[in-house]
Amino acid sequence: MVNKEKFMTINDVKHVKLVQWVNEIAALTTPDAIVLADGSAAQYDELVNECVEKGLCVRLNEEKKPHSVLFNSDPSDVARVEKRTFIAAKTKDEAGPTNNWIDPVELKKTLTGLYSGCMKGRTMYVIPFSMGPLGSPISKLGVEITDSPYVVINMMIMTRVGVKVLDLLGTDGYFVPCLHSVGKPLAAGETDGGKWPCAPMENKYIAQFPETREIWSFGSGYGGNALLGKKCLALRIASVLARDEGWLAEHMLILKVTNPEGKSRFVTAAFPSACGKTNLAMLIPTIEGWKVETVGDDIAWMKYGADGRLYAINPEAGFFGVAPGTSAKSNKNALIAASKNTIFTNVALTADKDVWWEGIGYDAPGPLTDWHGNEWIQDKSNKEQAPAAHPNSRFTAPANQCPCIAPEWEDPQGVPVSAILFGGRRPSTIPLVHMARNWNHGVFLGSIVGSEVTAATLDVKAGTIRRDPFAMLPFCGYNMGDYFKHWIEVGKAGDADKLPKIFYVNWFRKTAEGKWLWPGYGDNSRVLKWIFECCEGTAKTVDTPIGIMPTVDAIDRPADVSEEDMKELLKVDVDGWLKEVEDIRTNHYPKFGAHLPAELAEMLDTLEANLKAAKN
Ligand code: O2Y
Ligand code: MN
């Protein structure tokens, strides 16, 4: 039991509405105790100790992973649950064609029933948090109520938590209320018995109420479903705030590129989940003299500064990175960031209490305990062997532990953005890089982002493009057609010369035989260099039917990429693009109906006309 005497309590809170809300939720959920998360290291340690004592996590080897723990979740609670995620706007039309919608009144009724008595036998934690540097004009404050100590300690890494946030809130400051429960009340004398508590899938709800700017999450204790500052607030609710207040809340990494002369530029980039955003944000350049540093790996909030440029902040304070595939080769900086003070979830445990996962870069050092808690012995001859770490296993690591964190990463004013990148996994058609002619053309490129479906699933044929506009498909809190319009409006509000240039990149091109054409990882710095030069006005470029492209000698070629490969990577595949136009015209844009901005329909017509002219 957390010793409440040591810490500030809810009775010390001066914010009248906050206290009222806490009391209301306590009356509904009937917890055994209420604890205020004050943000102190002592409270973090006490919560971790409590979890260790209850068998909910394992303390790792103090020499190999100091001050770190490993949690295993329930097998039904391992990732964001998009089918159980709802935008409860007043009308279905406001939620749009890409979101699950439920009437907010109906949903609140259902959830109030589920929340009733749901914290029985548990402690209710009240977490005041800031998304973004404390006091930044771009930051937003939230308060999460949760019955999960796992959520509290993760929020303490991922956001800025505690007394300083209460000071900023004062007696009546605005906060986004975020309500969370794992949905597993305990009967008198019952314990979790060392098992991750959560509710069955049909009772999981990740609900956003855009009109009232509320988040109600029930039944899942995992990641984006439960750490409500991240996807729920910083993207779904923030996208609504951004629309109404004239800024951008985006699923984007932020990085800083510095050239050999010491000039720096900041770049943001949006890729669908699982396209290597964390790796790009932390890449180690393979070109002499260039440097890349990280501001953020997942979310960017961008607002106009007094000088008319767009400034970005990373609203988060940590990385919730996917573990499998993270190795010294793919992302050494992430491994170092997660080498201490880290919470691991669903990775495998070695005999000496270190962590291991598939793609860590070395074989399992003897028998392991897999993420289910069973003994696991690596059998490389068995291609069907179930993985030791869940494919969506995670590390939660403080951002300031990343060796390449940019000195400006917590600048309350944000960093001035020179370039915005969009990309997806496209084995064919989309070239390695091309630049939009102007802002609206860039918005068009963002709106058509997608990845090719590689293996046939029940509902989609292999080879189909699954569109994920702006990589925001699961994260836009309102009608995606209106969101496109908002991007166009933001462009109109700026001075064309000061707006970031927009690029479409594709690291995932393959030959007909399925061989990668581009090595990716650190070699992506070569593309960043061309993008940097475009911003400087010194790049070698050629105007093409699809936009502005590098000449074939404009990008420094890695030793293992032939000139032929480079030509292929930078070719305009006119027939492939005409198919792309057809797919956008028939399958993608019609979804948005009258909400599709005319500017984007015109861009599609222009692209088609350009391609047809090039063909004739
Ligand atoms: O499965 C989850 O709950 C995590 S999803 C996630 C985590 C960190 C960064 N991005 C994502 C994502 O799905 O985009
Ligand atoms: Mn993400």
Image (tube, rainbow, N blue to C red):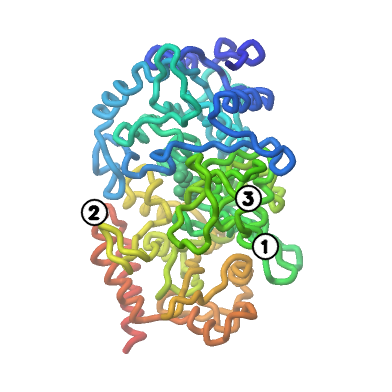
Q: Residues within 10 Å of mark 2 (few under 14, many from 20)?
A: few
Q: Amino acid at mark 1?
A: Ile
Q: Please state the horizontal and vertical placement of residue 269, each as a whole percent of the image.
A: 52, 58
The quarter of the picture where residue 25 lies is: top left
SS for dot 1 = loop
Which structural element holds mark 3? strand
Q: Nearer the viewer, mark 2 or mark 3?
A: 3
Name the one closer to the observer, 342 or 226: 342
Left or right of 288, for residue 171: left
CA–CA distance in space, label 3 to label 1 = 14 Å
Q: Residue at x 64, y 62 (%)?
A: 329
Residue under pointer 1: 284
Three-letter amino acid code at the position of disc 3 = Val
Q: Of the residues under marks 2 and 3, which one precedes in the sequence?
A: 3
Q: Tell me: is circle 2 under 8 Å from ligand 1.
A: no
Horizontal and vertical percent position of residue 218 = 38, 30
Q: Which mark is residue 295?
A: 3
Residue 248 visible? The answer is: no
Q: Are marks 3 and 1 in contact (CB under 8 Å)?
A: no
**C-alpha separation, residue under disc 1 versus residue under disc 2:** 45 Å
Task: Where is residue 152? Give x, y as percent.
Answer: 55, 28
Q: Dot 2 lies on which element?
A: helix
Q: CA distance from mark 2 to mark 3?
A: 37 Å
Kindly report which numbered mark, 3 or 1, lies closer to the viewer in this rendering.
Answer: 1
Q: Which residue is mark 2?
A: 594
The label on residue 126 is none
The residue that appears at 34% across and 43% down in the rendered structure is 478
In which quadrant of the rendered image does the N terminus lie? top right
Label 2 is placed on what type of residue? Ala
Residue 455 visible in the displayed image: yes
